[in-house]
Amino acid sequence: MDKSTENPTRRTFLQATGLGAVAASFEPVAAARRLLDRGPEPTLRWGVVGTGSIANSMAGSMKRAKGATLAAVSSRRMETARAYADKHQVPLAFDSWAEMIASDAVDAIYVATPTSVREEICIAAAKGGKHVLGEKPLASLDSVDRILAACREHDVAFMDGTHFSHHPRTAALRSRRDAWIGKVSLAESTCAFLLRDRSNIRFDPALEPMGAIGDVGWYNMRAAVESLPDGLVLQGVRSSLRRDPETGAVIGGAGELQFEGGVRSVWSCGFDAPQSSMHIHIEGANGTIEMPGFLFQDRDNSASLLVRQGDAEPTTHRIASEEPGSVLLFEDMAAAAADPSLRSAWADRTRRTQALLDAIWHVGLAAETAGR
């Protein structure tokens, strides 16, 4: 197999990814040059709401990222907040997220709570003049729009917590996809693993109403957003849901999104897969692209694309990166905090992902009702 090594600049790929969805005529190279001229981003002092597994796993990324520092944490119980603070060397602990938002010691809030309470905290953070990073998913597209409206009104940045969108591989895909394989007709994604622990929050419909659809299905929908051309009109949706017989939680689903021009996105997700599968397959007029393990990167932070053009043997394109996507997420937040022109592209990604998620969720519910 032929292999080519690619080491594009981080900022060129960031801009190609960041503005492509809203300004196709905006030259990526010129945009990258503007970013390079802007100078270093200010350091954002982060306050974390929540002390669960995702908040713990992201602590290291915040501390490692340029332009970020972990300054505070809040939890409903002070002892839990202090335990997190001690574990991650966080200076301040609060037993009230409202008090932390009001503190002059933080510039940005990472909302790592259950979906059911995320909107309230995101909006409160924006009203407090803090930049907002909200874990995914949000409750609905209407909820996303209320959060984004608050962020625009108070001149703060918003991003969702999707890591792989920030890795240079995703920008490479977006900028070179058509040159590699021509006009795209299909993006197929799987995002599934095995989760047996029913005490996990994902099995509690009161806290995570969409279950696996909101959790891993979000990545399927983001895969469609990142893999397909921008601006496609959704024309049809097929969706089926699988539920856990003990808890009633949605533990999986599958379906198809049908866009104008015959473009499709086929997806499957779940907590009930015997083997983990995180894969994107893209078909174009002239070839195919494979993104194995699309949520992750290798130990050296690189990630690969396999491109097959016609009947030729596939070529592996290794996309280098100084940091993993979880770290680059916080660096891109610092950039968006410093430069308001970067914010709408990330907000657009969130809206498009949530809109597709809402569509498969409601169609899946309707199919359940019809089948009773």
Image (spheres, rainbow, N blue to C red):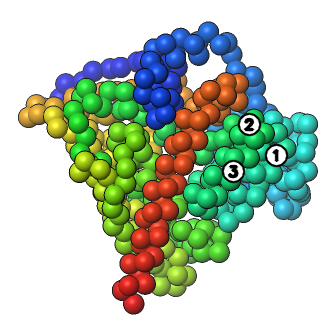
Q: Earlier in the sequence, mark 3 or mark 2?
A: 3
**Disc 2 and disc 1 in contact, CB within 8 angstroms:** no
Q: Amino acid at mark 2?
A: Val
Element type at mark 2: loop
Residue 312: image quadrant is top left
**Disc 1 and disc 3 in contact, CB within 8 angstroms:** no
Q: CA distance from mark 2 to mark 1?
A: 9 Å
Q: Amino acid at mark 3?
A: Ile
Disc sitting over residue 127 in the figure: 1
Residue at image location 52% in from the left, 60% down from the top:
215
**Disc 3 and disc 2 in contact, CB within 8 angstroms:** no
Q: CA distance from mark 1 to mark 3?
A: 10 Å
- Answer left or right for 168 relative to 318: right
Residue 23 in sight = yes
Residue 59 in sight = no
User: Which one is nearer the viewer's eye here, 139 or 247?
Assistant: 139
Element type at mark 1: helix
Q: Earlier in the sequence, mark 1 or mark 3?
A: 1
Residue 126: give x, y in percent of width and height. 77, 44
Disc sitting over residue 281 in the figure: none
User: Which one is nearer the viewer's eye here, 232 or 212?
Assistant: 232
Residue at image location 70% in from the left, 24% down from the top:
338
Q: Amino acid at mark 1?
A: Lys
Q: Residues within 10 Å of mark 1 (few under 14, many from 20)?
A: many
Disc sitting over residue 156 in the figure: 2
Residue 219: give x, y in percent of width and height. 46, 52
Residue 286: image quadrant is top left
Q: Residues within 10 Å of mark 3 (few under 14, many from 20)?
A: many
